[in-house]
Image: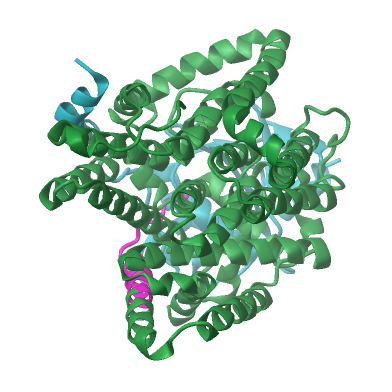
Amino acid sequence: MIREAVLMAALAWIGMAMTLPLIDHVELRWTHIAAAFPIGAAAYVAVAAAGIIVAGRVSPPATVGITAIGAVAIGTFAWSRRSHQRLVGELVRRLVIVTGIVVVMVAAVRLVHVARVTPDSIRYLVTADTLAESIDAVSGSDLIKRHFVYPALQALATSTDRLYLASMSPLFGLAGGLLAADLVQREMAAAGLPGRRRLALIAAMGLFVATTNRLLYDAFYLNSHMVIATCVLLAVVAIRLRDRAPALMSGAALAMVVVTLARPEGFLLAIGLAIALLSVESSSRRLLAAVTAPAVGCAVYYAVVLAPRVPGTLDRLTSPVAGTMLALVCLAGLGAAAALLPRVGEIVRRHILETAIAGVGLLTTVFVVGGPEILIQSAGATAVNLVRSGGWGLAWPMLVLGLVVAARARVVPEQRTLTAPLWVFAAGFPLLPYLRDGAFRVGTGDSGNRTLAHVAFVAVVYVVLSIGYSQVRDRAPEQRTRPSPPG
Amino acid sequence: MKATAMLARFGAPALVAGAAVNMVVLTVLPNQSQPVNLHPGGDLSTVVSYDQPSTSRRYALYALLGERSPGATLFVPPGTEIDSYVAQGIGDILTVEDATPFVVAADVLSGTEGVFETASGIEVSFLLLDSNPGDDLRLTVDDDRYVIGPLEAFEESSG
């Protein structure tokens, strides 16, 4: 247990060190704490991906060591520019809290056996074991279907007494919940919603999430879904806080890498997150760091690791590897153009979301024309899963209704930071069964049903923020927030 | 009613109502899954894992104790010897089907993947899990289908 706790805590400490400038803001204490573990884990994944490209294997101890050295260097540089005495107490407090959370979680999942294991999990774990030896021993289908992120994270188990880390998904789930609650609390406080109403709103959100079976399930499931859902939310939080907490942008960049390398359809979410930033940001440095750099890095991973090992990769542009590489290269170019050419950046900010949705829709149409029966079957199965068989209960019917009303109300400032990932994912969702060469099916285990979890956190947060801002408007019309651009 | 007024008045109560309905219609934590415990403790996981450190046996642990859809099947090729205590545990949670004749039809993608056809005509694609030297059993998985068999069964028939 000690080794697992130390490893998980080390990831959280790495995340705290990488975002050390947040120490300046007492009010961002829980943002710092909540983001620590996912940022540290994402940094580990990025270094592990570099290790695969260079050495052809994941060495968990070396990867953690290299990631820690980098994080310490970043943290030391940030610390050297601050007044130490005033901040030591706050830093110690945050380290104690984050370490306590990790240790309690690791101990809890060892005492109470709640890990969820399916055949899919087994293949992830097999891949994790094999990655620690050599990427060449991993089958081509596992490389493309299971991808890299979750096996790389579970490869850490080779340094512990367990065959897998049951605490991985719960820690991501808890981080996601804390990030959501913290974001709502902070924005509603700034908007002037009274404390009791804020508390009630956060409690209602927590209750809604906790009783949504699939989200709770994913928090204990040996699979990548909770990792992705939390990283999508992390990126959104970082983008919304970019002016107040620029250090969090490293989290957005790393989250882009994680969602892209976590599943074959991850590039869709990466596009959505990139558009969320491109829609609101004009800083060249941030666009290059959080859009272009992750896209280039992931494209290199695809070219060096996947292309030579996945059969049929480059036969056609619509194959999962070639298509994703093309999308990533276009994204990197778009980010660079928006960053370096102010006029292009302005045009991108105004039109990128609609253009991206139209582009994804057009691509989907090309596939649908070639085989409409897959779309028909998938649409039917997804409809049944959403309302009856997918394990979502009332969650998605209510969220869809809430999203429609929230989009119409448009009360959330800079709402494209929240809606871009949702709309791009929705536009690309019909494309997914074509990419996997098979229609979605009815049942909780269907991959189409499971991928809905990836945007669930952001959907809930968008609806809850819309409720909160609407309450502020309803109670005090004179305190209206500034209108947001359409999106 | 305007969208903002609708959200302000009914948004939070709707979330609570949705949560209440979810608690009624869903299990809070899904069942069908048994705990995976790698420490000696007397449960089935211990039986499978104890003193059996080979890779395929370790992954047999995951398969046997993992979550399955109704109707999940374990195919047993001829010549497979499974410890009776473990077999009893398997029988409680999986439908066991004799896979005679066991013929691996073709290799797919690499030497670790293949397809075999059971006597009842079911085609099962599988992932062949690695095993340690001296290991006498191999485990394969394919969605809700599992195959446990002797090494020879896979080696002799694979092509």
Q: As drawn, is A222 to the left or to the right of A54?
A: left
Q: Magenta span has A69?
A: no
User: In this picture, is A217 found above or below A165?
Assistant: above
Residue A46 position in % (x across, y down): 66, 61
Q: As drawn, is B77 to the left or to the right of A22?
A: right
Residue A59 position in % (x across, y down): 70, 72
Instruction: Give the number of marks.
Output: 0
Q: Which of these two is toward me, A114 or A365?
A: A365
Q: Which chain is green?
A: A
User: Residue A393: which quarter of the image?
Assistant: top left
Q: Residue at x 49, y 80 (%)?
A: A3
Looking at this view, name the residue that lies furthest to the left: A196
Q: Is residue B11 visible?
A: yes
State which quarter of the image contains the N terminus of chain A.
bottom left
Looking at this view, name the residue that lies furthest to the bottom: A85
Q: Residue at x 64, y 46 (%)?
A: A260
Q: Which residues are magenta?
A: A98-117
Residue B63 position in % (x across, y down): 52, 50
Q: Which of these two is toward me, B2 or A467?
A: B2
User: In this picture, is A327 found above or below A380?
Assistant: below
Mainly helix, strand or loop, the magenta region?
helix
Q: Residue at x 40, y 59 (%)?
A: B44
Image colour for chain B is cyan
Q: Residue at x 31, y 55 (%)?
A: A182
